[in-house]
Amino acid sequence: MTDVISLQTLRKEYGSVVAVEGVDLEVAEGELIVLLGPSGCGKSTTLRMVAGLETITSGRLLIGGRDVTKLEPKDRDIAMVFQNYALYPHKTIRANMAFGLRMRGMGAAEAAERVASAADMLDIAHLLDRKPAQLSGGQMQRVALGRALVRDPAVFLLDEPLSNLDAKLRARMREEIALLQKRIGKAMLYVTHDQTEAMTLADRIVIMRDGHVQQIGSPLEVYDRPANAFVAGFIGSPEMNLVPATLDAGQLTLADGVRLSAPEDVGAGPVIAGIRPEALEPSDEGAPFVIQGVEQLGSQTLFIGTLGPHRIRVLAGRRDDLVAGATIPVAAAPSAIHLFDPTTNQRMGSTV
Amino acid sequence: MTRWLLPGFLFVGALATLILIVGPALYAISLSFYEQQSLTADPIWVGLNNYATVLGSAEFWNALGNGFFYAGVAILLQVVLGIGFALLLHQSFRGRTLLRGLAFLPYLLPTVVAVLTFKWMIDGSLGIVTILVDDLGLPPIYWFETESAAMMSVILVSVWLWTPFVTTTFLAGLQTVPVQLYEAARVDGAGPIRRFFHVTLPMLRPILTVIILLRGVWMFNKFDIIWLTTGGGPLGATEHLPVLAYRQAFTLFDIGNGAATATLSFLVLMVIVTLYFWLFPMDEKK
């Protein structure tokens, strides 16, 4: 399969500040790539370089096999959905959606036809004669998607498209975007700081931090085998417990008398142990976990407490019998423990 | 205490408005129904006679036409140039803040100072412009001596003085337009000119509506600049209604006709402003 987008050591500097440090990425036809990371990590800048809204300091960008590194946004065969929708407030929804087509010289009749079919697809046909101010946030989001959709570009670029919506609407729009993207089968680059969005939407996730790509992989790959402690902490909810420990002969010592069984093939010495809250379970024997807080989630119970000096979280099946102040033994399967080098923060060993 | 604060302030405001604005205005309007040969003479009731005289005189219609021409051309130039400068000053470049400050300077000058400076610059024997024109081997320019040149010169000084108002207001407005709209337009394929007409201008329409209204009223009523440069001449070529009213009342001491002219000027302006509000409503429905 040919790559629709190819980012080759894409780099962005603002004066002496490096915002994006050489991103390499190949995106295949129909693939949904999520750029994920905390604010300031360079994900939006990367997207904007692909869009042509930021100049590329160095590196090359190919879209559809064509070098577009220096082209204007309009010549790149892309369409973009902005965080604040960026609808033209004085134009009707119809005119908003048709604007990009008309600017490219498409006739009124053909543009109207395209707008109508995109509006049907997004269920906004009844809104076409309104102005943006008369729409709700969710409706504006649909219009912004529609405006990109009518253009039928090679690549869709979405910059935190759901971050202005409330939680319920966000979940629904997320599903719709996923379905829409599968239906139209076009490549999509999607920027978010929300790891749930990334996990649920992405074919592959690109995790970034401080301008560097940390890991590229499918949602389950990055969940199961985080490349470093940062990715481990960023992916998964509730967050993975990361505690300093000493490894020796398959025993992980978190503190005096606080031990867990660990993978054996890594060697010995100081490590950072990463254990997901859902990997820890109350068991007959294990490390003593002192419960300090209990959060009932319905089907599950989240315990907040300490293992020795370390504050950790344990996500168990529903338990009504344990209250704050109790101490229970907890254990994790050795294969579920991730080990990271304490100096480089990189993953150690081959744990699956 | 606080219960009386708001009514109290409102009362003071209302009183000041009555004494300083409504009272004199009503007095001026009442004067237009009397014949009075000086400010101290006894007024004689003449009904609408003054209006008949004024409306029947060629100089009223000449002044009305001049007023429209002067205000219209001056506003047009101020708005077009003002927007142009605002767009330039909105770009980022070194020394932008300084230039923004400089661009506002003319607006701070009292009209008298600006007019005197201009008159010196074009002085027939000493003016720097006169000398430059002469050095370039061009024929001398008669700035205020011919009828069409006088009008153009008055407009020129007005535009120089008050374009900064448009520039500053428009520049402030430009900074409120969300950057994402321009980016969306770029992605949509709109070049700089289309971005101006499809994003900037519609977004700043409310500001522009107010600018044109304010500048229009001010230019139509502008007295000092014409009085100081041409005094309405030559041969009434730059005489508009405020100057005519002043000349009638305080040069010819025909208070009644002067008041009638002023009242008619006020009525004309009212009609225009009402029409303007009707054509360009301020609280446009979204």
Image: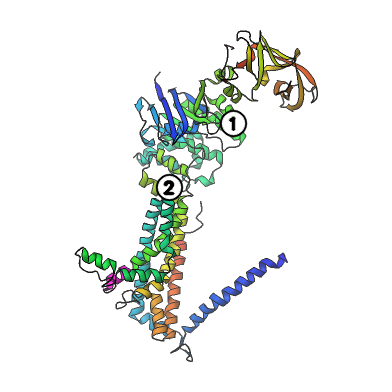
Q: How crowded is mark 2: few (under 14 residues within 10 Å), some or many (20 or more)?
A: many
Residue A88 is covered by the magenta coloring = no
The residue tagged 2 is B199
Taking the spot 37% from the left edge, 74% from the top edge, the residue there is B228
| Residue situated in front as seen by the camera: B106 or A65 | B106
Q: Mark 2 belongs to which subunit?
A: B
Q: Nearer the viewer, residue A102 or B72?
A: B72
> Mark 2 is on which residue type?
Val
**Coloration mode:** rainbow
Residues at marks 1 and 2, CA–CA distance in whole angstroms: 32 Å
Image height of B237 relative to A110, above or below: below
Q: Does residue B104 lie above or below B248 as drawn?
A: above
x, y percent for residue A118: 45, 35
Q: Residue at x 49, y 80 (%)?
A: B28
Q: Give the image quarter of residue B134.
A: bottom left
Local SS, label 1:
helix
Examine the image and state in which quarter residue A13 appears.
top left
Tell me where the magenta segment starts and ends, as one range: B136-153
Q: Are marks 1 and 2 on the same chain?
A: no
Residue sitting at 43 percent across and 60 percent down?
B165
**Residue A297, image x, y percentages:** 71, 27
Q: Which residue is drawn at 37% across and 54% down?
A: B84
Q: Magenta stretch: dominant SS?
A: loop
As drawn, A158 above or below B23: above
| Numbered label tally | 2
Residue picked out by circle 1: A171
The image position of residue A326, as x and y in percent, is 80, 22
Chain containing the residue with disc 1: A
Mark 1 or mark 2, which is nearer to you?
A: 2
- Looking at the rendered image, the quarter that the C terminus of chain A falls into is top right
